[in-house]
Image (spheres, rainbow, N blue to C red):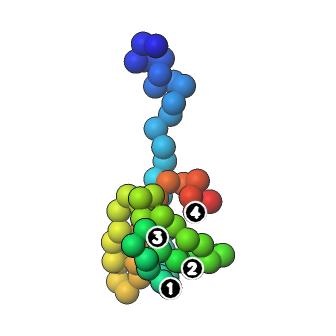
Amino acid sequence: MPWPLSLVLYPKPRYIWTQIHIYHETRKAILVSKDPTIWIPKSRIAKIRLKGNVFEICVKECIIG
């Protein structure tokens, strides 16, 4: 498949920054509070930053919803 066509079929994933509260951390995932309490695999987190006193993570839009 030529590369220009592959860009049309597979769009670039969208990443978003979202505020979270970390409840528990293991080697492979973190338990966070964002509307429902969910486990997020560490491999799915692109970036982490501390803004003020709040943690923010950058993840794909489909993970947080």
Which element type, helix, strand or loop, lies under badge 3?
strand
The kind of residue tagged 4 is: Ile
Q: Are marks 3 and 2 in contact (CB under 8 Å)?
A: no
Residue nearest the viewer, comparing 43 with 5: 43
Q: Are marks 4 and 2 in contact (CB under 8 Å)?
A: no
Q: CA distance from mark 3 to mark 2?
A: 13 Å
Q: CA distance from mark 4 to mark 3?
A: 14 Å
The x and y percentages for residue 53 are 37, 86
Residue nearest the viewer, comparing 28 with 61: 28
- Residue beneath disc 3: 29
| Upstream in sequence: badge 1 or badge 4 | 1
- Residue beneath disc 1: 23
Residue nearest the viewer, comparing 53 with 2: 2
- Residue beneath disc 2: 33
* Identity of the residue drawn at 35% across and 62% down: 47
Between circles 1 and 3, the one closer to the viewer is: 3
Between circles 4 and 3, the one closer to the viewer is: 3
Between circles 3 and 2, the one closer to the viewer is: 3
| Upstream in sequence: badge 4 or badge 3 | 3
